[in-house]
Image (tube, rainbow, N blue to C red):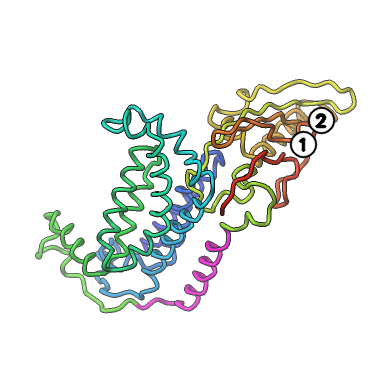
Amino acid sequence: YKYRISIILLFLSFTYAELMDKTTYLNHYYFISILSFLMCFLPLNSNFSLDNVINQKTYSKVPSWTIDSIKFLLCIVYFYAGLAKLNSDWLVEAMPLKIWLPSKFDLPLIGENLMQYEWVHYFMSWAGMFYDLFIPFLLLYKPTRIFAFLLVIFFHVFTKVLFPIGMFPFIMIVGALIFFDHKVHSRLITFLKNLFTTLKKSSYVTRIKNIETLKITNQKLVTQFLCVFFIFQLLIPFRYVVYPGELFWNEQGYRFSWRVMLKETVGYTTFKIVDKKSGKYFYINNEDFLTPFQEKQMSFQPDFILEYANYLGDYYKNKGHQNIQVFADSFVALNGRRSQRFVDKDFNLYGVKESFKNKKWILPLNDEIKGI
């Protein structure tokens, strides 16, 4: 039960910290949240855990679906990230790598050389797409598993060097070990035990009673719940199809869809508070309300713009202003394109509630991005 308490606390605390500020959202954080949520329902304390020591018993076997659940989640993350790269900006224009990689000139050996060549940008774009699409199958297929694991290590270490993506590469490297069979895990655990002098034959740990197979209570209910969980994970990334316009531009359905580092967006957005009756107005200094990072993220994400506009309206209403209207003047540049007006500057955003409805006040992109 100590494992169950620990993993529930991890899920709740990490997810709470992640959701405290929407501007810090990353697919990587979302992955950790749903992985820890999934782990709440799996018997991951069956072996090599503190619960084994306290209860003086361990299990040599668990139902295969408990391991397959984590494998399936990892496969979804990789494969959907690969599908998301099947677009013209990534494959035909090598965007946004064509913007990002030349700035890595300070990297030893490769920064002033390889990172500056256009063919490298295209090679890495296509290689990244093929890696994400095929690495799940290479890990699942035993003859290619070791080769695939070496690819996982190289890919994630390399991306860690190039981009500030935190612990995500290490989580994916360690997570890939679950594709190996139990013999490999047993050898790894034995190796780890031998590293600690306290885990000798005469130690307390060796007196733990071994039980052949773990029996899970309410297994039918848990498996039914996990089926719903995975159906949700399979469908939610495709919710963007119900919205018109370019997904990379309006971002309606962009989050929670494993679209990892696919675009470079820069925006500049100012807000005007208007008295509807008198026509008097004034402009907002965003630095009075937002941190520099929050302002940067808000400037090109529609739901942030709407939420901030409503906050400004409520703020000045509480200050005694009447007949308030809030207008946004916004210009955004996507993946190296020239900036263009992002929001209808004549649309009053104050009082518009955030919902799943199409945001008609977002102006269309003057270009087409082909692909998924």
Judging depth in this view, the residue of 285 and 368 nearest the camera is 368
Name the residue: 41% across, 57% down.
7
Question: Rounded to the nearest whole Å, what is the CA distance between mark 2 and mark 1?
Answer: 8 Å
Judging depth in this view, the residue of 37 and 294 nearest the camera is 294
Judging depth in this view, the residue of 128 and 11 nearest the camera is 128
Q: Is residue 42 magenta?
A: no
* Residue type pointed to by label 2: Ile
Whichever of callouts 2 and 1 sits on the residue coming sooner in the sequence is: 2
Q: Residue tagged by mark 1?
A: 350
Name the residue: 38% across, 64% down.
71
Q: Is residue 222 magenta?
A: yes
Q: Quadrant of the C terminus?
A: bottom right
* Element under disc 2: strand
Would you say residue 17 is visible in this rendering? no
Q: Are marks 2 and 1 in contact (CB under 8 Å)?
A: yes
Q: Quadrant of the N terminus?
A: bottom left
* Outermost residue toward the right in this view: 277
Would you say residue 112 is visible in this rendering? yes
Q: Quick one: label 1, few (<14), some, or many (20+) residues within 10 Å?
A: many
Predominant secondary structure, magenta span: helix
Query: The magenta stretch spans which residues?
Result: 215-236
Where 284 sits versus 169, above or below? above
The label on residue 324 is 2
Residue 359 lies in quadrant? top right
Name the residue: 81% across, 26% down.
274
Judging depth in this view, the residue of 14 and 353 nearest the camera is 353
* Residue type pointed to by label 1: Tyr
